[in-house]
Image (spheres, rainbow, N blue to C red):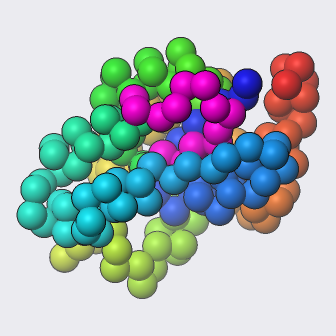
């Protein structure tokens, strides 16, 4: 049974790549953020606004740890899942952690006009983006495989991951 956790900063393509990867592997795709939204009955922005980031992180951790441990899955995580050591350990212990990386400039361009990101709302968006990016980089490095996505089409990224898995006997 294969389990893959896609990590990475917001805007690196975790959901898009995850859906394609799961389809190619013939397994289920799970988007943790979508599960949280469904469970809470409100958007992530609303969760942040009404309950705060800490409560959102609690929900995120609970959802991660509640995933079916007997099923083959590709899991697109939220960009902040790596902030808690318990989450990083859980993912490492139960599957492959693949980090989808992109340059700050690429991420900034991909997120231009995206108003759904609560951590980027208000003035000084670019400075907050840079600060979050720098704060999290070393945590994203705690992975089995890091893949630069800048300039790559989603299917190209999937092909690279499939080759990496094949080389591991999966």
Tell me where the magenta segment starts and ends, as one range: 65-77
Q: Is residue 161 left or right of residue 76?
A: right
Residue 140, image x and y in percent?
49, 35
Instruction: Tell me if I can see residue 147 in this picture.
Output: yes
Query: Residue 13 placed where, x, y %?
Result: 61, 59
* The N terminus: image quadrant: top right
Q: Quarter of the image holding residue 33?
A: bottom left
Q: Quadrant of the C terminus?
A: top right
Q: Judge whether 21 appears above or below 114 on screen.
A: above
Q: Residue at x 39, y 29 (%)?
A: 65
Q: Quadrant of residue 117?
A: bottom left
Is residue 66 shown in magenta? yes
84 sits left or right of 52 in the view: right
> Which residue is depicted at the point 53% across and 15% down?
93
Report the side of 96 relative to 61 (left or right).
right
Q: Position of residue 158 (x, y in %)?
A: 80, 50
Left or right: 144 as drawn, with respect to 164? left
């Amino acid at each position: 049974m294969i389990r893959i956790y896609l990590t990475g900063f917001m805007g690196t393509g975790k959901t898009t790549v995850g859906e394609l990867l799961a389809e190619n592997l013939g397994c289920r795709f799970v988007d943790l953020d979508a599960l949280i939204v469904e469970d809470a009955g409100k958007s992530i922005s609303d969760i942040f606004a009404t309950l705060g980031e800490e409560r959102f992180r609690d929900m995120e951790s609970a959802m991660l740890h509640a995933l079916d441990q007997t099923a083959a899955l590709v899991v697109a995580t939220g960009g902040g899942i790596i902030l808690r050591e318990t989450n990083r350990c859980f993912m490492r212990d139960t599957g492959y952690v693949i980090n989808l990386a992109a340059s700050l400039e690429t991420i900034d361009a991909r997120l231009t006009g995206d108003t759904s990101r609560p951590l980027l709302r208000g003035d000084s968006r670019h400075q907050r983006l840079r600060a979050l990016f720098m704060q999290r980089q070393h945590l994203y490095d705690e992975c089995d495989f890091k893949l630069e996505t800048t300039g790559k089409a989603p299917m190209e990224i999937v092909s690279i991951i499939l080759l990496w898995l094949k080389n591991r006997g999966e």
